Amino acid sequence: MEQLSGELKKAVPKNKVKKKETNDICTNCGLCCYLPDGSPCKWLRWKEDGKSFCEVYETRLGRYLGQGFYCEDIMKVVTLYKDCPYNELKMEKAIKDNE
Ligand code: SF4
């Protein structure tokens, strides 16, 4: 992940940096967009190149997905998904939270 200089960090709003980083590491595999029964989120879409995207990405957080689940920030979801780049970040966060 790209490191920003101290000067640039001050100039860029924190939420903008987080959003850029989030987009940078997601490989768009779509694995986190399925409900526990295996059915896909109703806003999950697929491109011709096999990559997924969320039809309501900008407003996805907090949306009711069905079966008692709401869309959450991937970093707040404890589930690890095969080959997801967020797995490592989640593990690091879990270790930090338990220190
Ligand atoms: S499982 Fe990880 S890599 Fe796959 S779409 Fe979700 S966040 Fe992106």
Image (cartoon, rainbow, N blue to C red):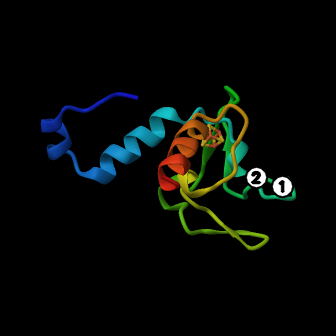
28 lies above or below 10:
above
Q: Residue at x 58, y 34 (%)?
A: 85
* Circles 2, 1 touching at the beta carbon (< 8 Å): yes
Q: Residue at x 69, y 48 (%)?
A: 32
Q: Residue at x 50, y 62 (%)?
A: 59
Alpha carbon distance from label 2 to label 1: 6 Å
Quarter of the picture containing the N terminus is: top left
The crowding category of the residue bearing disc 1, from other C-alpha atoms within 10 Å (few below 14, some 14 to 19, many at least 20), is few
Of residues 12 and 4, the one drawn nearer to the viewer in this rendering: 4
65 lies above or below 15:
below
Helix, strand or loop under label 1: loop
Quadrant of the image occupied by residue 21: top left
Residue furthest to the bottom in view is: 68
Q: Residue at x 62, y 56 (%)?
A: 77
Q: Position of residue 18 (x, y in %)?
A: 37, 46
Regarding ligand 1, which quadrant of the image does it lie in? top right
Q: Position of residue 46 (x, y in %)?
A: 69, 39
Q: Is mark 1 within 8 Å of ligand 1?
A: no
Q: Position of residue 91 (x, y in %)?
A: 58, 43
Of residues 50 and 97, the one drawn nearer to the viewer in this rendering: 97
Judging by the rendered image, the residue that carries numbered circle 2 is 34
Looking at marks 2 and 1 on the same chain, the residue that comes earlier in the sequence is marked by 2
**Residue 39 - label:** 1
**Residue 23 - label:** none
Of residues 72 and 75, the one drawn nearer to the viewer in this rendering: 75
Q: Position of residue 43 (x, y in %)?
A: 67, 55
What kind of residue is marked 2? Tyr
